[in-house]
Image: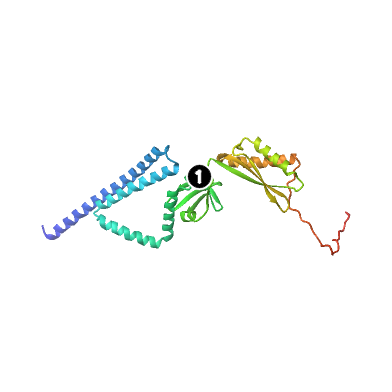
Amino acid sequence: MDTTEVGFDINQILTLEFALDFLRALGILIIGFLLAKFAGLALRRLVQGRASPHQAMLIQRGVYYLLLSVFVVTALIQLGFNLGVLLGAAGVLTIAIGFAAQTSMSNLISGLFLIGEQPFEVGDLIKVGETVGEVLSVDLLSIKLRKFDNTYVRIPNETLLNSEVDTLTKFPIRRIDLQIGIAYKEDVAKVRQVLLEIADKNPLCLAEPEPLIIFQGFGESSIDLQCSVWVRRDEYLTLKNEIQMDIKEAFDQQNIEIPFPHRTLYAGSVTDPLPVNIVSKL
């Protein structure tokens, strides 16, 4: 056998050996992916009754990515890659990506702060600026919300960290503040009593903390009052709708006027009165 034939046989053996290593590495990746996925789901179900949905989701993702990373490294070693070289290359690549994607890195760091601080969890109702929605997920780069009209909103974590975020479902009860204007001729004490009776008759209004009527001040066309009642958070919208209709109905029955803006024209003491012409119908 000549050297050419020997060389051909060696190349063939090397190619076959690489193919076998590649198939082993591929098998490790597939098994790792399935194992990481099922392990994450199993652990999430295990802690579901003991932890919040947000914490359960974080545990699932942490286990998934940890196991998957172990199997990815194992597959690369199977292909003959040097782990030290890989770690060095990964460090250089991370720095390069960090400079190239500063916004993404900022969102990533903000996401870590949000996960650590936990101002809200999955399932909470939050308000960011003019956007109100239910939290579907809290990820490293953004959060996902479902608005009341069933639309999907993605908000970057950096925006959340630099904005005022209202968690509307953080506590079991909420307060409804209704701004009400009445005419200057009305008896404020009577109106106050009517409002308290409306709150007392509605079963959704909590007796403790008790309803509160606040004199806000003298408006341009009305005396301004604030009627504040407390309600369980799950019944907030129901009570807010019901109590406003009850107030309108009670005011109509008691002949309490809800004024609209009035304008008075003043010509001055030294000017002639404004002329008024009466036009008869033809």
Measuring from the top left, give residue 89's x and y in whole percent: 30, 59
Q: Which structural element holds mark 1?
A: loop
Measuring from the top left, give residue 48's x and y in whole percent: 42, 38
Q: Is residue 206 left or right of residue 220?
A: left
Measuring from the top left, give residue 61's x and y in whole percent: 39, 46
Q: Is residue 61 left or right of residue 251?
A: left
* Residue at point 36%, 62% (across, down): 96
Vertical relation: 276 (above or below) 213 = below
Tell me the residue that label 1 is attached to. 124
The N terminus sits in image quarter: bottom left
Vertical relation: 131 (above or below) 270 = above
The C terminus sits in image quarter: bottom right
Give the farthest residue toward the left.
1
Colour convention: rainbow
Q: Quadrant of residue 264?
A: bottom right
Report the front residue among 109 and 70: 109
Q: Is residue 111 left or right of residue 18?
A: right
Few, some or many residues within 10 Å of mark 1 (<14, 14–19, 20+): some
Measuring from the top left, give residue 77's x and y in whole percent: 25, 52
Callout 1 amino acid: Asp
* Residue at point 16%, 56% (across, down): 10
Q: Quadrant of residue 206?
A: top right
